[in-house]
Image (spheres, rainbow, N blue to C red):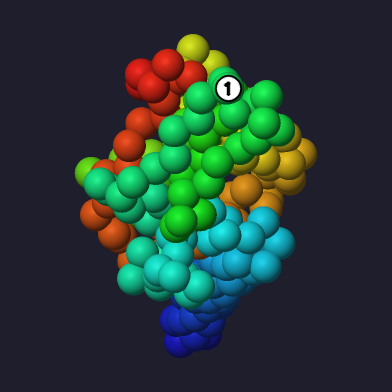
Amino acid sequence: MNRNLLILGLTVLFLGTFVVIGIRSVQSQSDMVQRGKYLVDAVSACGHCHTPRAGAEYNMDMYLAGHPANAPYPRYNFSMMQQGIFLLISPQLSAFSGPFGTSFASNLTPDKETGLGEWNEEMFIGAMRTGHHQGVESNRKILPPMPTKHYAQMSDADLKAIWAYLRTITPVKNEVSPALNPRGRPY
């Protein structure tokens, strides 16, 4: 009988440990997502470019979905430089054109076809560290005004928190145009 109580006690202790570890894991994942939301919304202000405007307000139906598909975008020409114009910005504040070419705020939602749904954490962190699409140095550079040097200096924990949060937002199907070189052709 004492042996049965000992086995029961050890079983309860063993299972209780897994329950506590599981609860901590859920809490830490929730904490990580909340930290990511804070970093995205308050610190890095990703929505300033990646959430298009509808007039003076952000279009929250397009939260972090990038430059709207088929929306007009600015086209820079080098004669503007002589006039002191170095950057043109779309009315949605999500497309930018300058001597570097034209860049479009990308779709950061977890949509599998048009957003980051097919990316993994390693690709995301690589993109932030290298300043290249999907973190592959042979891929195209991520163009201004994306502050890649800022993100490259963030801790792995902060980038993982941002990634965790981005995985939780509502997917939005929005095919963003590819970046264009100064001649108006895709990179």
Q: Nearer the viewer, residue 19 or 47?
A: 47
Q: Which residue is painted at 44% across and 57% down in the image?
A: 92
Q: On the picture, is 166 further left or further right than 155? A: left
Q: Residue 186: which quarter of the image?
A: top left
Secondary structure type for disc 1 = helix
In the image, residue 36 lies at what x, y percent?
Answer: 59, 62
Q: Residues within 10 Å of mark 1 (few under 14, many from 20)?
A: few
In the image, residue 118 lies at what x, y percent?
Answer: 31, 40
Quarter in which the C terminus is drawn: top left
Is residue 66 among the parts visible in the rendering?
Answer: yes
Q: On the picture, is 41 further left or further right than 7? A: right
Q: Nearer the viewer, residue 167 or 76?
A: 76
Of all residues shown, which one is farthest toward the right?
Answer: 153
In the image, residue 140 lies at what x, y percent?
Answer: 47, 20
In the image, residue 177 lies at what x, y percent?
Answer: 33, 37
Q: Which residue is painted at 52% across and 34% down in the image?
A: 97
Q: On the picture, is 70 further left or further right than 163? A: left
Q: Which residue is painted at 61% across and 37% down in the image?
A: 87
Q: Residue 86: which quarter of the image?
A: top right
Of all residues shown, which one is farthest toward the front?
Answer: 83
Amino acid at circle 1: Ser
Q: Which residue is painted at 46% across and 49% down in the image?
A: 90
Q: Residue 65: which quarter of the image?
A: bottom left
Above or below: residue 133 compared with residue 169: above
Q: On the picture, is 32 further left or further right than 113? A: right
| Location of mark 1 (residue) | 79
How many marks can you see?
1
Above or below: residue 12 compared with residue 186: below
